[in-house]
Image (tube, coloured by chain):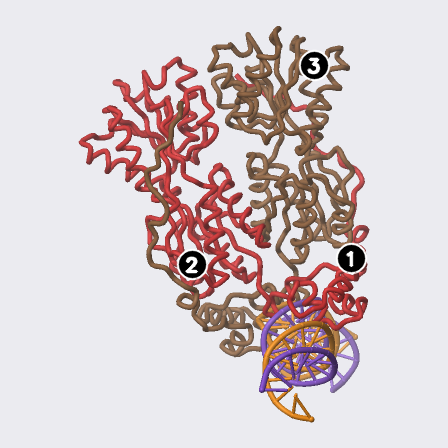
Chain colours: A brown, B red, C orange, D purple
Amino acid sequence: MTWAMTLAVLGEGSLALDDASTFSGRPRPTLRDLAREAGVSEITASRALRGEAHVLPETTARVQEAARKLGYVRNRLAGSLAGGPSNQVGVVLPSLANVVFPDVLKGLEEVLEEAGFHPVLGISNYDPDREEHLLEALLAWRPAAIVLASAGLSERGIALLRSANLPVVEIMDVDVEPIDMAVGISQTASGRAMAYYLSGRGYRRFAYVGHDIARDRRAGRRFEGFRSALAECGHALAGEMILQEPSSVTLGRTGTERLLAAMPERPDVIYYSNDDLAVGGMYHCIGTGLSVPADVALAGFNGLEIGQALPVPLTTISSGRHEIGRRAADQILRRLRGETVERKVDVGFTLLAGASA
Amino acid sequence: MTWAMTLAVLGEGSLALDDASTFSGRPRPTLRDLAREAGVSEITASRALRGEAHVLPETTARVQEAARKLGYVRNRLAGSLAGGPSNQVGVVLPSLANVVFPDVLKGLEEVLEEAGFHPVLGISNYDPDREEHLLEALLAWRPAAIVLASAGLSERGIALLRSANLPVVEIMDVDVEPIDMAVGISQTASGRAMAYYLSGRGYRRFAYVGHDIARDRRAGRRFEGFRSALAECGHALAGEMILQEPSSVTLGRTGTERLLAAMPERPDVIYYSNDDLAVGGMYHCIGTGLSVPADVALAGFNGLEIGQALPVPLTTISSGRHEIGRRAADQILRRLRGETVERKVDVGFTLLAGASA
DNA sequence: GCCCATGGTGACAGCGCTACCATAACCTGA
DNA sequence: TCAGGTTATGGTAGCGCTGTCACCATGGGC
């Protein structure tokens, strides 16, 4: 199989440095310096920089010129402390390993950046304690808002957010009642939709391959929805393989292999907890010569490009991750502008009926 | 092919809210409140919270108890302004669309989080102007350090970083001389290594499929390295297909299709600018019945799981993205502790000799 | 008995900025 | 002509914290 060969190794680096040599001692110019340079008062300089009204264009120009000359960089710590707005948004995500969250983060960042905001990131690793800890640490920076893809928030975490007195957007899921606002899709409904769809396509022997549901509760909710809708259609799950590991393509491959080995009578169709696993399942079929969907049909969740680009495009549900990020940012911005916003935003999902099921 | 069906739509949300209804007016307790509650002075409360020496354990306990009671959350804006350390690290990345940068970010976050630091994120979208702008905005928060995967920094950007007087880590690439520190691999060398490897395997008709090199300069450097090493081996490129779009699996598929259509005599081996494209190439081969590597061999760059899990594992170069993030964070932490650090850290790459070439 | 080191605590200034109120100059209309 | 606005600017306080210096016990060495 695959073997590895190390071609280059650590530590080509030479030239060691200690900080004394690199950190010059010259202090940064302050607003006072800037004001003096421009021949105006501090407050006028401040207003000019912030583009406030009531400052003559030529005064503004003079201040900007002085700023350029001095290399002045505004200190937002001081500004925020003094009552100015913060433009940081605390973001707590459970993981970056899956493409899902980078995509959400991308959507968030795009919209925030345009409005001059920056995400401050924390990764909870699906650990509620860590999540609570992160929340506290991020709130200490007095962000303008918090975005949270919760891994199961504690009472204290909720209290922390409540008393923080700022917009809070819980993302990914609109099945539960949010602390403040929620943007996402109904995970349960997406599982149900797939069950109805597959059932309608005439499949009868269903199997499930999933990852670590105890930690990834959203995957768990999809599975619940899938199973309950299956029951409504008069079917039952003929087999399942749940692996207590984070999702990956490899996990999908081995999971599929083990599932099929454990089922003497092959299932018609396999529903996966997400597209990573489903692509792994497809790889297994390609590798073992099983024809998809003739021998076995496959369905996933997420609508990843990697599944859509397959020779046999994956039947899956597009979860609008990017859109979730954008809408979450949008909710925050609108709320900060004092506009009225909805408590729950369901961005909706789309069933991508590929060729795999 | 694939058709789409929209099952759920926007705006299930009802219950509109305006901010007046949700933002309670009660101000956050300050250190003064906390000190009063605990019956100590502000400075003692501050020291107790920060776990400084010279505070009696029972005093610390009393302060912590008071903090819990009041729901006190430390204000780090004030702390940092007053001369305490910042624990924010500005991070500027060109993109989150490719798996590479989320992986780097993950490594960064892991190590930073452990030390109580948080990344503040900006995405430059491979735009130098935007990068400069982001840098300035992030520096305004007086971060403890900056991590930058540069898209081509301007003179002013360099000056900004120099005068900021803080640790700066340029990541991904150690081919150029860093402003302060660099952590990454030699992109050029990785391209060269692949050329030598493929050449050594006996391939003679080489082709290249790449994405948007003008923007992704690192991909460009790999290509340069590949081409120059190929020449050293006495070979030349028999064909190339460069598509001015961001990389994706689909792009790899269509790129391969177009390359092969344009080359009457099929190449022995195709080198791709990264694994996304190479996987797309593999999909094309699977779809059209070309045998890999017998009919055409494929090689990529990055060592993505999606390529390694393929029935025919991809020959590629593992770029240690995660490790780059971790080492970058490590450089920062060590520098902040005043330790001596190397100017350049080459984390090294590993050629994964799969079955595809 | 004195000195000094050490441990625990506190008073106070000030980090760099912006909100608030004040002021001066100018304009408008009856 | 002058009350009453509007516009451009400035003085000052204070956001909430931590660094610095100072203070008072206590205790051990000579």
* Quarter occupied by the N terminus of chain A: top left
Q: Nearer the viewer, residue A317 or A276?
A: A276
Residue position marked by numbered label 2 in the rendering = B157
Q: Secondary structure at mark 3?
A: strand
Residue B205 visible to an observer of this rendering: yes
Q: Are marks 3 and 2 on the same chain?
A: no
Chain designation of label 2: B
Q: Residue B265, position in %: x, y?
A: 25, 18
Identity of the amino acid at label 1? Answer: Arg
Q: In the image, is residue A302 above or below residue A354?
A: below
Against B63, is B323 above or below? above
Q: Quadrant of the C terminus of chain A?
A: top right
Q: Residues within 10 Å of mark 3 (few under 14, many from 20)?
A: some
- Left or right? Give the position of A94 relative to B355: right
For mark 2, give the secondary structure.
helix
Label 3 sits on residue: A237
Instruction: Write the residue at 53% across / 49% down.
Output: B111
Q: CA distance from mark 3 to mark 1?
A: 48 Å
Q: Which mark is residue B68?
A: 1
Are dots 1 and 2 on a single chain? yes
- Is A174 situated above or below B335? above
Subunit bearing disc 3: A
Q: Is residue B290 left or right of residue A112?
A: left
Q: Quadrant of residue A94?
A: top right
Secondary structure category for the residue under label 1 = helix
Which amino acid, by three-letter code, is at mark 2? Gly
